[in-house]
């Protein structure tokens, strides 16, 4: 079996996951825009609004922010301040990229851990949010998002390490 054929199904699965991420982001953004616009129109024209409109908009901002960061990390379009990779070439540049990715993965793991502890504390406190649901349901994106971003950077570090081991340079 050709090595390319072996990973074709995996690539298709990853592409489908990326498409699902993009679709989810687009639907959430469209929902947020519609709800926010409706709130503005209802307040200005009828002096009335949806009681759930503002809390839903705040929740969607949180979710869109973290899912957007996840998508940016997937496409390597995240905010990055990395002077060394601009100055270095070859294996030195690859080594810096691996170290940067590992450091980022570690930071994301620490944030995800503490965010999970925070969400669990919120769940234990019995705090309620939108539609009287436990507030932790809405905050679960914080540890999940940072955990997935950290996983992506860990995989990126492994990918770059394998490239260097094969003699390829970025």
Image (cartoon, rainbow, N blue to C red):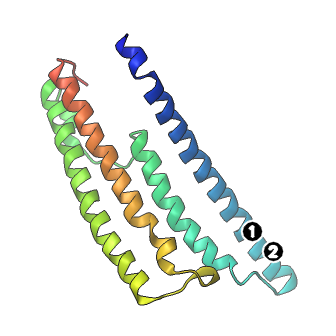
> Relative to the observer, which residue lies in front, 82 or 125?
125
Q: Nearer the viewer, residue 80 or 25?
A: 25
Q: Which image quarter holds the N terminus?
A: top left
Q: Residue at x 45, y 64 (%)?
A: 141
Is 72 drawn above or below residue 7 in the view shown? below
| Residue 90 located left or right of residue 8 | left
Residue 9 location in percent, x, y?
A: 47, 26
Residue 81 vs residue 108, the one in the foreground: 108
Question: Residue 73 bears which disc, if any?
Answer: none
Compared with 82, 159 (above or below) is above
The residue labelled by disc 1 is 37
Q: Which residue is mark 2?
A: 41
Instruction: Say if mark 2 contacts mark 1, CB within 8 Å.
Output: yes
Spot occupied by residue 30 in the image (x, y as percentages of width and height): 69, 57
Q: Residues within 10 Å of mark 1 (few under 14, many from 20)?
A: few
Quarter of image, res 106: bottom left
Report the residue at 41% width, 89% height from top: 125
Query: In what element is the residue under mark 1?
Result: helix
């Amino acid at each position: 079996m050709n090595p390319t054929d072996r990973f074709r199904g995996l690539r298709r699965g990853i592409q489908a996951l990326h498409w699902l991420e993009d679709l989810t982001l687009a639907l959430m953004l469209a929902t947020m825009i519609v709800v926010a616009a409706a709130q503005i129109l209802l307040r200005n024209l009828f002096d009335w609004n949806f009681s759930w409109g503002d809390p839903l908009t705040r929740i969607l901002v949180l979710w869109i922010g973290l899912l957007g960061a996840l998508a940016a990390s997937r496409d390597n379009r995240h905010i990055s301040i990395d002077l060394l990779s601009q100055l270095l070439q070859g294996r030195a540049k690859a080594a810096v990229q691996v170290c940067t990715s590992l450091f980022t993965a570690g930071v994301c793991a620490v944030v995800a851990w503490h965010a999970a502890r925070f969400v669990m504390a919120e769940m234990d406190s019995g705090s309620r949010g939108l539609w009287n649901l436990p507030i932790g349901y809405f905050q679960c994106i914080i540890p999940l998002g940072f955990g997935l971003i950290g996983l992506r950077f860990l995989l990126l570090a492994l990918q770059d390490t394998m490239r260097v081991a094969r003699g390829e340079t970025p």
